[in-house]
Amino acid sequence: MKIALIGYGKMGKMIEQIARDRGHQIVSIIDIDNQQDFDSPEFASADVAIEFTAPQAAYGNYLKAWAKGVKVVSGSTGWMKEHGDEVRQACTEGGKTLFWASNFSIGVAIFSAVNRYLAQIMNQFPQYDVEMEETHHVHKLDHPSGTAITLADEIVERIDRKQAWAEDTTDPSVLRVDHIRRGEVPGIHTIRYDSDADLITISHDAHSRRGFALGAVLAAEYTCGHQGLLTISDMFKF
């Protein structure tokens, strides 16, 4: 498979290594200083572009890739509120393809499935209040994390006593989501169900970014043979 990389930071370099190890060809690498390469024949030859950049750049990168007929796998967060409707329309009506996930880690996919199942159970036990905390490295500017937002949405959808999620809330009908920025932490997500009698906690603690990078390459392999608006639940059936 021919892969283009959009964004060449720590994630981009790790994705490059894993993709090459799995026998794929990197045909184009685009970063801030060579945006003109979107118009190169090398980029247009890619089967899939893997995009990890900043919230303000992600949507424009999708448009540039789609204009060249290149499918996109993206882990960029923070763009959906402003451009989500346009992306959905492009993928459902315009024939474009985007595989988007807030987190590509296989472990997080499993953790998310556990989160959904546990929330469904806990809907029956109103004596438990639920809250979430996410911790990331100091370079991560957006908060809460895209993964935390996904997990929070899953909880709110399944627990009737929670109507929404928010940061810094004391409203009992709202799921509280806290964020911590510390050191070089790749990512920790913790969900707690607390009652007068006991505390139930589930947590995912990433040791490195390698799990995210491998998941992104697996997503590119999946996207090569599929189209439309795709996500982790399409690739992993659990």
Image (tube, helix red, strand yellow):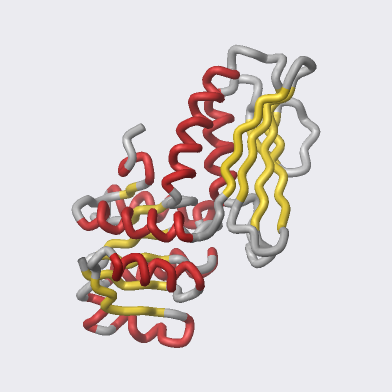
Image label count: 0
Along the horizontal axis of the image, is 198 left or right of 34? right
Is 223 above or below relative to 115? below
Residue farthest to the top, as pictured: 124
x 45%, y 33%: residue: 113
Residue 41 in which image quadrant: bottom left
x 27%, y 84%: residue: 40
| Along the line of sight, the residue nearer the viewer: 17 or 44 | 17
Is 138 above or below relative to 192? below
Quadrant holding the C terminus = top left
Along the horizontal axis of the image, is 11 left or right of 170? left
Is 82 above or below relative to 8? above
x 65%, y 67%: residue: 139
Q: Is residue 141 visible from the viewing direction of this image?
A: no
| Along the line of sight, the residue nearer the viewer: 110 or 36 | 110
Residue 149 in which image quadrant: top right
Give coordinates of residue 25: x percent, y percent. Answer: 24, 73
Give coordinates of residue 165: x percent, y percent. Answer: 65, 36
Give coordinates of residue 55: x percent, y percent. Answer: 54, 64
Along the horizontal axis of the image, is 107 left or right of 207? left
Quadrant holding the N terminus = bottom left
Give coordinates of residue 86: x percent, y percent. Answer: 40, 55
| Along the line of sight, the residue nearer the viewer: 218 or 159 | 218
